[in-house]
Amino acid sequence: MKYTFKVKEVSYGMIEIEANSMEEAEIVADKQYSMGNTVWKSGEYEITAAEKQPPMRTGDAR
């Protein structure tokens, strides 16, 4: 039997940037985040709303 759970995750981290202005720093920080260059410090998660999945039938295209 398969079950599906919904997961909510919130993570807290930091990106250190050296820049000439706040605007420039925000642009560079966004690029660094997109490239995965975040130092993650902590996080929280919650698993909720379990759903029982019906068994798959033979020949089912799912």
Image (cartoon, helix red, strand yellow):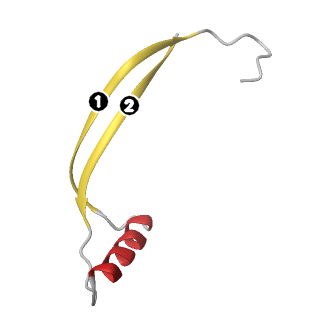
What amino acid does circle 2 point to?
Val
Which image quarter is the C terminus in?
A: top right
Residue 4 image offset from top left, x and y in percent: 48, 20
Which residue is located at x 33 percent, y 26 percent?
Answer: 47
The CA distance from mark 1 to mark 2 is 6 Å
Which residue is located at x 23 percent, y 74 percent?
Answer: 16
Which residue is located at x 28 percent, y 35 percent?
Answer: 45
Residue lying farthest to the left in this orientation? 41
What amino acid does circle 1 point to?
Glu
At mark 1, the secondary structure is strand
Residue 33 appears in which quarter of the rendering? Answer: bottom left
Q: Nearer the viewer, residue 54 or 58?
A: 54
Residue 37 image offset from top left, x and y in percent: 35, 68
Which residue is located at x 39 percent, y 18 percent?
Answer: 49
Location of mark 1 (residue): 46
Do labels 1 and 2 touch, CB within 8 Å? yes
Eyeballing the image, is 3 above or below 15? above
